[in-house]
């Protein structure tokens, strides 16, 4: 069945009598049809100003005397099989939906703040490109899913309007995402220069005025593109239920002056994006003199991703221009070729998202880059004056020669009790240095005097308790009296 069927007014076929009408093998009352203003059309539909029903092949509605139809199928029901336009729309919607997850990951990764907020360089400036990517993906996902019923419906209906409406919203979002990426690249170059030396970048009123007016002019162009396409009467776009209707109503509405003006506004926004890149190269990169050197410098300093983004956005704007002047390739046409729609209407936006997502995945947070640059400058400054900084582990271990395990054991060895603690105290007493008063001696007396070899050795706490620490204290084993001579260790006893 063709997508757009020829439609013409048909006289009611005569039935069994003058008040009977025979349509698709069913008998209808002529008086009832005339009273409710129903008309039979050559494309197999029976309709009045408010309702339309199918009356061909297997569609056999029953008309009651009060004008009510039973077992009726609407003309706008999706009775056709799914086709290429719907399948490509589903595929593109899935890609747009999946990109939202990656955009959120990159937004968190690159938009996170690791340094104190600066009035001149706010974190929201590097997040706007991801915000616009989210909007682009959302509208692209909606537009793709709305294409499912465009060709499945017997007659064109609101699905075509929904797809076209969402697609037109994609254009300013796509331009805004590329613009914010290009604008922020210039801001990032300025931040790196200012962070290295606040006085290195001289004040330039021309540069500051340009950076003030360029965003305002861009968003003015973007808003005018939105204003020229979205606030309009969309009903005429879906009136493509016959060739005559398509040519006389839908074609003029889809190629009117407002769509043409919107294409020119989109082109102006694209030129401003390109100029923004040239502005950043001119002010924040080494200067180049001569036209050829400037072109080489532009291609050398501008990242490759921006060259790709400029080309892809230009391809989509070219399709916007082509659609505004040629209805046959436009997305607004009910039976347009899907290759034009998805090859030049949706694919550039998908590739723009892919390029920005890949860059976000391999890129690094700008605050972390600034921190690393500051460390590198500190190392270079130290090297110039001959300072060698100790590694980090040196500062962590300088007061703990035993390392982390020993640092964990030392505070607990003199706490508590038991044999382990006692052995540690005894070892400290044996290996330490003990001092005595000058002119004193250390002798030992027992109840039964014997040779010095028979004097018991006093060690540790137990020995000190047994022997007594005061001079002349008697115990079961003997008395310790301080004598002349220094005592450096318990081994001297």
Image: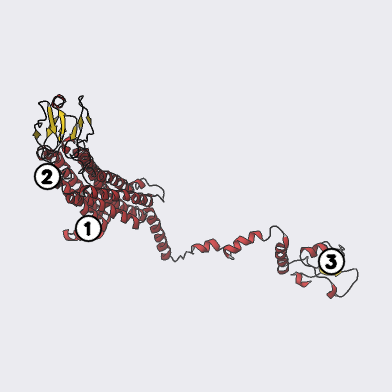
Q: Mark 1, mark 2: which one is toward the viewer?
A: 2
Q: Are marks 2 and 3 in contact (CB under 8 Å)?
A: no
Query: Residue 454 location, x and y as percent?
Result: 85, 74
What scheme was used to colour the molecule? Answer: secondary structure
Quadrant assignment for the N terminus: top left
- Which residue: 67% across, 61% down? 413
Inspect this view and state whether residue 295 appears: yes
Of 471 and 89, the residue lying toward us: 89
Measure how far apart labels 2 and 3 are at the Cα level: 119 Å
Callout 3: few (<14), some (14-19), or many (20+) C-alpha neighbours within 10 Å?
some
Q: Which residue is mark 2?
A: 325
Of 101 and 399, the residue lying toward us: 101
Which secondary structure, mark 3?
strand
- Which residue: 41% across, 48% down? 116
Left or right, 477 with respect to 6, comes to right
Label located before the other in sequence (1 or 2): 1
Q: Which mark is residue 481?
A: 3
Query: Residue 312 location, x and y as percent?
Result: 21, 53
Residue at the outermost right position: 448
Q: Mark 3, mark 1: which one is toward the viewer?
A: 1
- Which residue: 20% across, 25% down? 65
Left or right, 3 with respect to 446, comes to left
Q: Are marks 1 and 2 in contact (CB under 8 Å)?
A: no
Measure how far apart labels 1 and 2 are at the Cα level: 34 Å
Query: Residue 83 location, x and y as percent?
Result: 21, 48
Q: Mark 2, mark 3: which one is toward the viewer?
A: 2
Which secondary structure, mark 2?
helix
Of 339 and 403, the residue lying toward us: 339
Q: Which residue is mark 1?
A: 298
Callout 2: few (<14), some (14-19), or many (20+) C-alpha neighbours within 10 Å?
some
Q: Which mark is residue 24?
A: none
Label located before the other in sequence (2 or 3): 2
């Amino acid at each position: 069945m063709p997508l757009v069927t020829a439609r013409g007014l048909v006289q009611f076929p005569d039935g069994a009598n003058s008040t009977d009408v025979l349509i698709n093998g069913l008998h209808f009352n002529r008086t009832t049809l005339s009273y409710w203003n129903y008309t039979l059309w050559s494309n197999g539909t029976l309709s009045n100003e408010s309702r339309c029903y199918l009356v061909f092949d297997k569609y056999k509605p029953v008309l009651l005397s009060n004008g009510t139809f039973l077992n009726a199928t609407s003309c706008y029901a999706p009775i056709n099989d799914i086709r290429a336009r719907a399948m490509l729309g589903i595929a593109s919607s899935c890609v747009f939906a999946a990109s939202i997850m990656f955009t959120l990951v990159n937004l968190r990764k690159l938009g996170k703040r690791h340094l104190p907020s600066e009035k001149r360089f706010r974190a929201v400036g590097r997040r706007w490109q991801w915000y616009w990517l989210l909007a682009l993906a959302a509208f692209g996902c909606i537009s793709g899913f709305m294409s499912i019923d465009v060709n499945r419906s017997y007659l064109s209906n609101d699905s075509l309007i929904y797809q076209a409406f969402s697609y037109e919203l994609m254009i300013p979002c796509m331009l805004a995402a590329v613009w914010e990426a290009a604008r922020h690249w210039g801001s990032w170059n300025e931040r790196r220069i200012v962070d290295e030396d606040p006085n290195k970048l001289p004040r330039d009123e021309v540069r500051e005025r340009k950076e003030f007016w360029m965003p305002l002019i861009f968003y003015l162009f973007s808003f005018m593109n939105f204003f020229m396409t979205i606030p309009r009467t969309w009903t005429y776009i879906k009136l493509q239920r016959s060739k005559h209707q398509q040519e006389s109503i839908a074609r003029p509405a889809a190629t009117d002056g407002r769509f043409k003006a919107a294409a020119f506004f989109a082109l102006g926004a694209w030129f401003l994006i390109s100029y923004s890149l040239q502005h950043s190269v001119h002010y924040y990169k080494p200067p180049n003199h001569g036209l050829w050197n400037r072109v080489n410098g532009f291609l050398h300093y501008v990242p490759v991703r921006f060259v790709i983004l400029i080309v892809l956005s230009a391809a989509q704007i070219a399709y916007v221009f082509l659609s505004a002047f040629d209805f046959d390739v436009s997305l607004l046409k009910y039976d347009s070729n899907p290759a034009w729609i998805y090859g030049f209407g949706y694919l550039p936006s998908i590739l723009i998202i892919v390029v920005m997502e890949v860059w976000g995945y391999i890129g690094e947070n700008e605050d972390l880059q600034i921190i690393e640059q500051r460390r590198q400058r500190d190392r270079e400054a130290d090297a110039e004056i001959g300072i060698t900084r100790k590694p980090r582990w040196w500062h962590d271990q300088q007061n703990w020669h035993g390392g982390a395990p020993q640092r964990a054991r030392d505070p607990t060895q003199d706490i508590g009790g038991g044999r382990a603690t006692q052995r540690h105290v005894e070892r400290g007493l044996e290996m330490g240095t003990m001092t005595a008063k000058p002119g004193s001696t250390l002798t030992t007396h027992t109840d039964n005097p014997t040779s010095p070899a028979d004097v018991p050795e006093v060690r540790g706490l137990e020995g000190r308790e047994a022997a007594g620490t005061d001079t002349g204290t008697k115990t079961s084993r003997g008395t310790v009296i301080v004598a002349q001579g220094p005592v450096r260790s318990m081994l001297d006893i």
